[in-house]
Image (tube, rainbow, N blue to C red):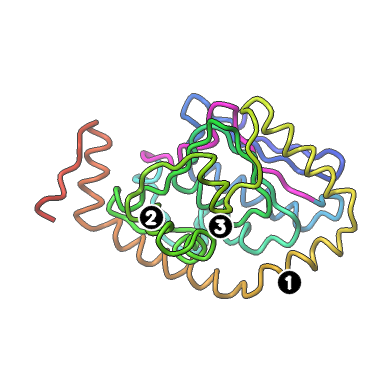
Amino acid sequence: MSDILTHIDAGVMTITFNRLDKKNSINSTMYAAMADAVAQAGADPSVRVVVFQGHESIFSAGNDIGDFLSQPPSTQESPVFRFLRGIATFEKPLLAAVAGPAVGIGTTMLFHCDLVYAGDNAAFSMPFVNLGLCPEAASSLLAPKMFGYHRAAEALLMGEPFFAEAAQEVGLVNRVVPPTEVNGYAQAQARKLAAKPLSSLIATKRLMKGDQQAVLQKMDEEGQSFGRMLREPAAKEAFGAFMEKRKPDFSKL
């Protein structure tokens, strides 16, 4: 079976992470599949809403480290950047159902969703600094805007997990429900949206989102820094330690 499943029903496209044996970690093939699905949803008039979901035990562990190191994104046409631009510019409502860990891009992609529902077991984290890297997906712009600077600084500089109740408090999550109910709840909300006039949904989202260019510009700026830092000693030590299952040592860097 595919690691990314897509299904369309009653105007709702559901994109499901389906790689449980690897904790729904995302490789370049999966990014390409999601980028293609988002583009299809944008172009298909029968699709009115898109929902991202994982399993009740995990949303996504973030990037597949092995795949990421062997095929680092090198151009703006890399699958990960196509996916990020796709969700950042998506005109229709975008929802996410998150249960369990949502690591790295598993969290940052949520800044581009319009509604996010979480299981009470959800754990969000953006551990880029811990990997010798910097934020991505325009999270360095969107996290301070949503959380306030100091809470965003705690999330991005410390890189420690924060949980469903805290995520709801800072506005990342709309509602917290039991993990076994989160996908179904998001689907019910998506169907409510799909029954509304699409032109009104698109116009309202566009007016609320405001300056899209600033988000894309920040995404490009982060991508350049990310690519440079990936080749530097701190990231090499962090990823080496991860692969060797040891604690990284940044004391001499």
Q: Residue at x 15, y 44 (%)?
A: 249
Q: Which residue is mark 1?
A: 207
Magenta stretch prevailing secondary structure = loop
Q: Which residue is mark 3?
A: 84
Instruction: Give SS at disc 1.
Output: helix
Q: Which residue is mark 2?
A: 156
At label 1, the amino acid type is: Leu
Query: Alpha-carbon distance for marks 1 and 3?
Result: 20 Å
The answer to whether mark 1 and mark 3 are in CB contact below 8 A is no
Please tell me whether residue 65 belongs to the stretch shown in magenta.
yes
245 left or right of 122 in image: left
Q: Position of residue 27 (x, y in %)?
A: 48, 41
Residues 160 and 87: in front is 160
Please tell me whether residue 51 belongs to the stretch shown in magenta.
yes
Instruction: Give SS at disc 2.
Output: helix
81 left or right of 192 in image: left
Query: Alpha-carbon distance for marks 3 and 2?
Result: 19 Å
- Rendered position, 49 above or below 229: above
Numbered label attached to residue 70:
none
The magenta span reads 49-66
Q: Position of residue 19 (x, y in %)?
A: 54, 30
Which sits earlier in the primary sequence, circle 3 or circle 2? 3
Q: Residue at x 26, y 57 (%)?
A: 231
- Rendered position, 186 above or below 206: above
Dot 2, crowdedness within 10 Å: few (<14), some or many (≥20)? Answer: many
Across the whole image, how many numbered discs are drawn on residues?
3
